[in-house]
Amino acid sequence: MADGAAGAGLNGRSPPLETVRAPPADGPAMTDAESLAARVADGELRLHELEEHADAETAAAARRAVVEAETGVELSAVAEHAFAAESATANIENLVGAAQLPMGVAGPVPVHGEAAEGEYYLPLATTEGALVASVNRGLGTITESGGATARVVESRMTRAPVFRTDGVETSVAVADWARENLDALAEAAEATTSHGELLDVEPHVVGDNVFLRFAYDTKDAMGMNMATIATEAACEVVEAETDAELVALSGNLCTDKKPAAINAVTGRGRTVAADVEIPRELVEDRLHTTPEAIAEVNTRKNHVGSAKAGSLGFNAQAANVVAAMFLATGQDAAQVVEGSNAITTAEAREDGLYLSVTLASLEVGTVGGGTKLATQSEALDLLGVRGGGDPPGANADALAELIAVGALAGECSLLAAMASRHLASAHEQLGR
Amino acid sequence: MADGAAGAGLNGRSPPLETVRAPPADGPAMTDAESLAARVADGELRLHELEEHADAETAAAARRAVVEAETGVELSAVAEHAFAAESATANIENLVGAAQLPMGVAGPVPVHGEAAEGEYYLPLATTEGALVASVNRGLGTITESGGATARVVESRMTRAPVFRTDGVETSVAVADWARENLDALAEAAEATTSHGELLDVEPHVVGDNVFLRFAYDTKDAMGMNMATIATEAACEVVEAETDAELVALSGNLCTDKKPAAINAVTGRGRTVAADVEIPRELVEDRLHTTPEAIAEVNTRKNHVGSAKAGSLGFNAQAANVVAAMFLATGQDAAQVVEGSNAITTAEAREDGLYLSVTLASLEVGTVGGGTKLATQSEALDLLGVRGGGDPPGANADALAELIAVGALAGECSLLAAMASRHLASAHEQLGR
Amino acid sequence: MADGAAGAGLNGRSPPLETVRAPPADGPAMTDAESLAARVADGELRLHELEEHADAETAAAARRAVVEAETGVELSAVAEHAFAAESATANIENLVGAAQLPMGVAGPVPVHGEAAEGEYYLPLATTEGALVASVNRGLGTITESGGATARVVESRMTRAPVFRTDGVETSVAVADWARENLDALAEAAEATTSHGELLDVEPHVVGDNVFLRFAYDTKDAMGMNMATIATEAACEVVEAETDAELVALSGNLCTDKKPAAINAVTGRGRTVAADVEIPRELVEDRLHTTPEAIAEVNTRKNHVGSAKAGSLGFNAQAANVVAAMFLATGQDAAQVVEGSNAITTAEAREDGLYLSVTLASLEVGTVGGGTKLATQSEALDLLGVRGGGDPPGANADALAELIAVGALAGECSLLAAMASRHLASAHEQLGR
Amino acid sequence: MADGAAGAGLNGRSPPLETVRAPPADGPAMTDAESLAARVADGELRLHELEEHADAETAAAARRAVVEAETGVELSAVAEHAFAAESATANIENLVGAAQLPMGVAGPVPVHGEAAEGEYYLPLATTEGALVASVNRGLGTITESGGATARVVESRMTRAPVFRTDGVETSVAVADWARENLDALAEAAEATTSHGELLDVEPHVVGDNVFLRFAYDTKDAMGMNMATIATEAACEVVEAETDAELVALSGNLCTDKKPAAINAVTGRGRTVAADVEIPRELVEDRLHTTPEAIAEVNTRKNHVGSAKAGSLGFNAQAANVVAAMFLATGQDAAQVVEGSNAITTAEAREDGLYLSVTLASLEVGTVGGGTKLATQSEALDLLGVRGGGDPPGANADALAELIAVGALAGECSLLAAMASRHLASAHEQLGR
């Protein structure tokens, strides 16, 4: 394993002057963290074993000490975390501290959702200058238009294990078995969870591979863990009752954290849409453009440009808003990938501009994951959606609707900016 | 605009009991923040104008006070940020504080890159339990195999404006003009930047639309802003010299923050690959499986499963590592989308397992964006890649290589775990 | 309209010397065709109105005469058609004759399908040299391996109209209505057809668009017309019962004759798979390579190469076989597009090579379309699948299984050829 | 091998009553074909060896006799081919006769192309009722609008071999070598062809795979064979000069006959566009709709619908026209797949409707392939594009422009029909 004193040192730099080693016996008493760090340096403990020997806070301090000593880099900002180390044990291993992203708010905006109804400030954590301002401007326009409508169209978290068979004939038999035994699969799957509900199992055959795409209603949880555990139980039934052998609990047909048409087409997590009709005067006076010009930009950029790019995202910047609201509210940042499967439509109607954004696969939760962490739970509180909803699923639905409204604002603002040609100058001013 | 005291209140909840209003004249003196908040509440100031009346820290405090008063939610954790508010002005507007994500480290691991050479601890910021442990295990295997090789294959940041013409004949003329006048475009573009270099302009015609895909070497910057500004200048030349009219500075053929085949096929930002050959004994003893079993999982899951899903990502969890390292090092979280365009290959060779991951479009920088923020710059320091490299571009290259190695570790660990069937149980233990 | 004598003439050539005009009154009697042609030349009749004035054969002759006169090109080969002009009236308008493609046979091969069981010669119509030879070699290998297994996995022809609503809220209401009123939609749809059966209606919302994807069992018909007519009837119910307004009977979510992930993922027409296990000795002696080498080619070319290409087709040449068998048997040539959505898998097993091909969206029929034409119905007879099957659907199922076996042979042959490196030389010899 | 007299017989039917066997010595003299057929039946000759023992015509007759005897099916229509059997030897093996498709003509239409200039009748071979009528109506509208403009945007046929390396480091070295040694590759490649010209070699690295995408100007040839042979020669240089080993001459990154984003994005064969501006009165009087209504259908169906379907084809029925003109003119039917990568745009301009279609990857030739066959060469003559063009490439360019105009007509007609809502009834009348 690595040794800070050996060879060219870490990162190809000269070795740091000081390393953490046990001081001479007559030296000053070491803190617990220092002493643990010394034991790691001496090869007595491994970096990931520290939590077995100290509380989470001390273990993190010790880990920082080890890394600082080996690299010569001071982690003083990283060390300043607002959450208790203990509270993050379900979220991270080998903790050294926190990454801090600036959080801003945009709004307030009136939202007419099914789960989200009222006025909302949207929290956004980002390092991209101009983004919060852009969303804020969009929300301002939406607010003056009377607010945005939003609806969750569908809600289903999926997990798709892949099984091996001896060939096509068996694969088809397994697929048929799965279609006919949904009840048995549901029983096994739902025994592992108090909230989850198996909605559907969709078989796909490719030669001697069978993929079973399990879809769950996971209520207020984003649901990947729940779906994984439930599916594992169902897989045991499949293996017991058919000639299929499980190869991987996720066969990439789920599809989690990869850009995939299956999500854009059939949805994953929440499929959610938001729209607004902006009066013509407002488009002209506030956005300094026309409904027709915005519709044209949307066609040439979001439709034709994305078509030519072989894209699954027909929008201007949905991922920006999804990412910023995901980070603020404790969602899984890697699922921004699927969150970008969004289609924006814009049409010039007689009275003004109709604008909509539909996110096919927005995976959100208000329980589990990063939602309990200190800053994240405050952001969820800001939206009034922390924890389990009433009825179950209502909070995650509301969060999805609010992110859709945020995305709508981002589209409104950016399309309008382009229609009046000042994207780059906005960046020059705000983005640096 | 919103008023905390009116109607159903924010978020559909009862209005908070106290709102921020100017106290009676004889009351205790208000702090600056309180007084600013009161002026917002009175409609005298708008939320985004606070920085015009106070320093960044005070403005953020005032903004928190407004939002807290209107929503009844306390933002005490959000308020505890390790970076100076002032330092974040290029990264955010309407600042209220920070989102804090747990950061862990994995490694160290020997990396044999062209830009990154030596042993490295990889910083990962995530809220997904089990992720850092998974990467750490993968890095452990890689380390025992002698380290990973990594190479940047190509480096080019793109921006593709869309122009309107009167029809196909003009479109083709504009495309031809662009092909023949690369020098003029380069001159205009490069006049706006001290570092950027225009590599290429690729014209695409779709009816009366012309897209010009500008590709730049942006050195150590991720480069979107640089590319946007430079392209805007070049567009002026196009408009002056041809019959094309600019419609949008980004025509979605760039493609930024959308899942798009153009990025997966032709690359964007860094195209970077990493690989390792793991001795057979190590696969058996440490990973408790065989090269053949891992290759089979890779084929059935990452290749066949992704193929069947209509995916652009043929990997197990590249986005997890990309997201976690992006967040730790100040990259743009929304670009995790393109970061997931990765292909993993695994083959059983005589002596063991060959494993590779190639990320087609990894957009990274070590200057600009979120890289200067307090925790992010410490994480970059940990990797020895903060700021401009020597030669220019070397630091961003190194960062790309290190993320690729992290992704490789994630693939190694997850494929091996699946090959030995314990994904769900690992989640049960660590993930909650 | 065009006039052969005017200007630069047709095709930019000098005008032909003779045009068809009424001869002087005392000239020789004109044939019916000549006289009709003269009336067209005189502007009295239009080219597409000829069938109103003569039988199909004469009308075609007259049309040829007109075109020949205007262009100076003799259509003598085109005129020699083996089918009766009258018999083609459901297949073409403005008939002038036939395009003739060489037809070859490959086989015979033993097929173990569910609908196709026995030995078969496969008819292939193509102009690509080396193709029939390639399929024939593949079938030879399959035959020596004991034949191929084939199965139809699913059968569903789809049509997806798009409706306009006033916004997201209504769109969701329409989607919900459709989910809850499948019976009413089925009643309306099935009233238009004696064979078709509505299996499912899948709603998709995008802003103020609602797409309803109707899926039918169309038995032995390919089914596009049946599905179109049935869906039109169902659309009237949707319009009567909801606030949706039909915009287009096909909203491209069907998806017909476009490369689309929705077909590759969820299937269209027949999803059909075929496989074979080829003994190791046979691979070595007959194909001059090894199972391992073929598996490697399949991975690098069909999986990794297609992945990198952003492809929906993970095969070597499935479209070649699909096209050639489609043309021979009267299928719709434009649906070769969907027929190419195929995944080939190859694995080295202990005893030899396992090879499979799965076509996600093979749209075939044995009634309707071009199946009644003279040469096409002979080719269907050759396969024993002409006309309606017993039970209904069995003939089209069998045809799908046989095409899958043909595709399997093509994959076998080409992968083996590549594994032993003689693709180009084969082309040099046979392809010209 | 198969034996018509054994077991359940071919196609699972009862064995035919008579099989072809040598008659008793004193029987009537056999024709050459009968005698050859008898030798095949006796196992003395194999079906594909007949051309070694007789002229092409006799061999085909013998082959028919064998197949007829074994299956009991009479191939009398198939036997009636207008081309000489001898003339098809480069196009087919195991010839039994011809598949005959009805051919119709549409037009004439004025075309303002760069290579095609004048009035043209378009030949279409299809079995889909209503198609020729639809194109003919579209061409009528285009004609009244003054004709269509068309342009070839780019022309490049590609072939992309895949090489194996020992890992990422070598892969990158090979890619770099290829970039730097274009001249050597061109020399080797161009030595194999009198017409072809190597334009570019684009390297793509995926782990231990290197794909080199060779792009050629193949003039009037579609060019796959030329490109394959030239690339094979270049591959020898790559293998000699680098550490890469050729695995497959086509690595699926070409991409031939598979739906692939790489073709839609970067083009293959001809990228060609056509457009027309249709006066508002004409839209109203002739098409019974409005520019606005057509633009709306195009947006909702061709853009939003295709987007939601994860499609690479953003058009209504381009593949229909491509297939029908491909079949008429001797193109490769399997390449209809790439031909469907087309984007249609429609916009309501002040004076009327602007309509365009851009086909990204139309692979056509006027020499080689099926172009010399009897009916196909007449159809090419009809367009004035048979054989090599002057300058070389001009004929294939013209053919591409004409197919684009045909596709434009198909889009015009179908969009207009939908805008005035009579798709299904048109099918009812004409399609059966």
Image: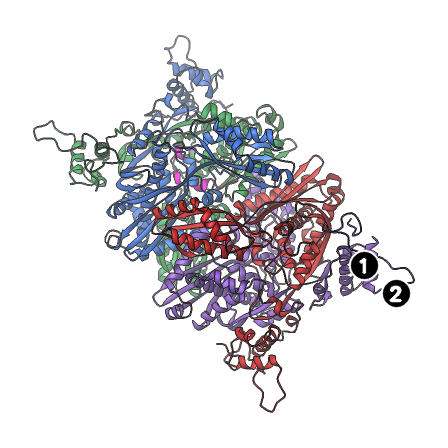
Chain colours: A blue, B green, C red, D purple
The residue carrying pointer 1 sits among few (fewer than 14), some (14 to 19) or many (20 or more) residues within 10 Å by Cα, namely many
Instruction: Choose between B157 and B332: the one closer to the eye.
Output: B332
Separation of marks 1 and 2 at Cα, in angstroms: 15 Å
The local secondary structure at tag 2 comes to: loop
Q: In which quarter of the image is the C terminus of chain A?
A: top left
Residue that lies at the very extreme toward the bottom in this rendered image: C26
> Vertically, is C394 above or below B283?
below
Q: State the residue position of label 2.
A: D28
Between marks 1 and 2 in the image, the one whose residue lies nearer the viewer: 2
Instruction: Choose between A19 and D136: the one closer to the eye.
Output: D136
Label annotation for residue A263: none
Residue that lies at the very extreme toward the right in this rendered image: D26
Q: Quadrant of residue C291?
A: top right
**Mark 1: which amino acid?**
Ala
Q: State the residue position of label 1.
A: D37
Mark 1 and mark 2, same subunit?
A: yes
Residue range of the region highlighted in magenta in the rendering = B324-345
x then y, percent, for residue B403: 47, 35
Image label count: 2
Check the residue under mark 2 and report the chain it is in: D
